[in-house]
Amino acid sequence: MDFLGEGLRRALALLLGGDAEVSGVVFLTLKVAVTATLTACAIGLPLGFFLATRPFWGRRAAFTLVNTALAFPTVVTGLLLFGLLSRRGPLGGLGWLYTWQAIALGDVCIALPIAAALSAAAVQGVDPRIRRTAQTLGASAWRTAWAVAREARFALAAVITAAFGHVIAEIGSAMIVGGNIRGSTRTLTTAIALYTGQGDFGLALALGVILLVLALLVNIALQVLQGQGHA
Amino acid sequence: MLELVGVRHRYAARVVLDLERFAIPPGALIAMVGPNGSGKSTLLRLLALLERPTEGEVRLDGRAVSGGPARVRPGTVARRSVTLVEQRPILLQGTVRDNLGFGLRARGMRRTEVNRVTEDVAARLGVTPLLERRRHELSEGEVQRVAVARALAVEPRVLLLDEPVSSADRAAAQTLYAALREERRRRPLAICLASHQLEDAYRWADDVRALAEGKLSPVTPENLFRVELPLTGAGDLKHVRVGAIEIAAMTDKTGPAILAVPPTDILVSREPLASSARNVFRGRVIRLARQRAGAVHVTVDVGVELVAVVTEEAAHDLQLMPGGPVVLAFKASAVRVF
């Protein structure tokens, strides 16, 4: 158990000492996670709203597809994305392979089904009279959607939290399309995997603690926002 | 003019509404009556352009605004002509004030104007003390009044009300009806109200229409019975079991149907009369209600409740009073089957 205590001591020292490499990894992780979460939610929430409220041919199949995508292995996502972004791939021209953009793109692919499926469920849980009431009072489609979203705000905040939680903890895709390059594409999760493999347990544990603290802070921030919107 | 034309509306495979035509002319005051499940709420939702009819169309001023061969999707502009207050209305997030202003803000009205209209409509409906409250701080009756005020605030051409006084006490109901009358004095407004209370409907509306099993009754709304018509009978004369009695009706139909006995076709007497009427039932008067000048609706328990209409003079001559014995008679050919 000594190595565990030693690891925790090392973690504390790194956290309090303001290590430049650790700061860089934390900053990159946050940048990727926030970008991916915002992008996934910007697409996924309207998509979920559409799935939940608009009857169309093939709707059930679309639901099945989105729900299946929830369980898609992240390493497979990374693999497919690697094929697309590699020099000979259709998106090779972007030159994104082994950049933070590639990691963010992978995270968007992972978070999008979460945002769409869970927001669809959240909207479906709203009393249908809310939508009818907004419509009968002459609200436009956007204002009606806003009225419904206000009703589902707690569930939608949980959707954002879940999406953020997934992308910040993601490793499979980030490792494949990011390459875990020091000072460039090394995120908290890939760094933890690397340092554990190298036997630097203290550093790996320190990064793990930081990851948990980040997730905790984001959850607290969302809860504060929810509290402010309480009706 | 708001109208449904050739509407057959289905939920899954079940036809819930089947109307050749249903029109609300400008300024009309219509009451829709019918038992629960008769299709009243569905009819109102179609008229409010909140659902598209499976078949047929909804027209506003002669133009198809929902359904039809082109499967027109109702637009916001058409929807702003009609407002529905549901049987169990719900308030949106925010205060009562926010709710009253919702439709006005949706129309792009400026804040000062929204406040003025909100205060005005709240005063008319007696909800001013509730303005700063939120939905969980209101009773069901208060929510219903706020919902009507919210609907009136946007000044629709047609106001649809689904059982608007179902959660209100007598005084609140009177306030509501008075506010609606006042609104109609201020500006042209057509109102279509769904109710299962016939007496309220008669007292309040110019035109009472009955809905049964999704169809408009060809006769007045009283004495409607859901029946199973037998396969056998002497010619077209069938004896149909209705509650504790058997009614003779002339029809060639069989199977499930609605049976209607027009109240004006029922003869009321103190003793059985020798006549051609195939339906003669003894019973006791349950209540007497003066609905229109000179006419009295007599509700009689003959095993089921039947309503007959007699003149005030006849009611006086027969000394009709609650609890008193009477005999009702009507011909088999007077019974309508649809």
Image (tube, rainbow, N blue to C red):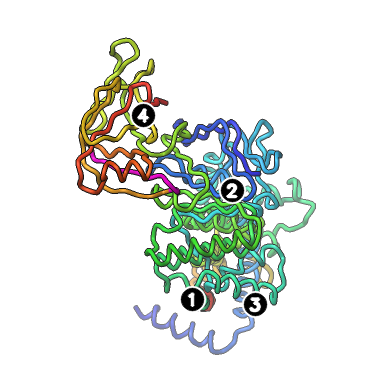
C-alpha separation, residue under disc 3 versus residue under disc 1: 55 Å
Image label count: 4
Q: Which residues are magenta?
A: B292-301
C-alpha separation, residue under disc 4 versus residue under disc 3: 82 Å
Q: Which residue is mark 2?
A: B28
Q: Earlier in the sequence, mark 4 or mark 1?
A: 1
Q: Which residue is mark 1?
A: B130
Label 1 neighbourhood size at 10 Å, few (<14), some (14-19), many (20+)? some
Callout in the foreground (4, 3)? 4
The picture places residue A229, in percent across and down from the top left corner, at 53, 75
Can you tell which quarter of the image residue B103 is in?
Answer: bottom right
Q: Earlier in the sequence, mark 2 or mark 4?
A: 2
Residue B295, magenta (yes or no): yes
Can you tell which quarter of the image residue B1 is in?
Answer: top right
Name of the residue lying farthest toward the bottom: A17
The picture places residue B3, in percent across and down from the top left corner, at 61, 40
Which numbered disc covers residue A24? 3
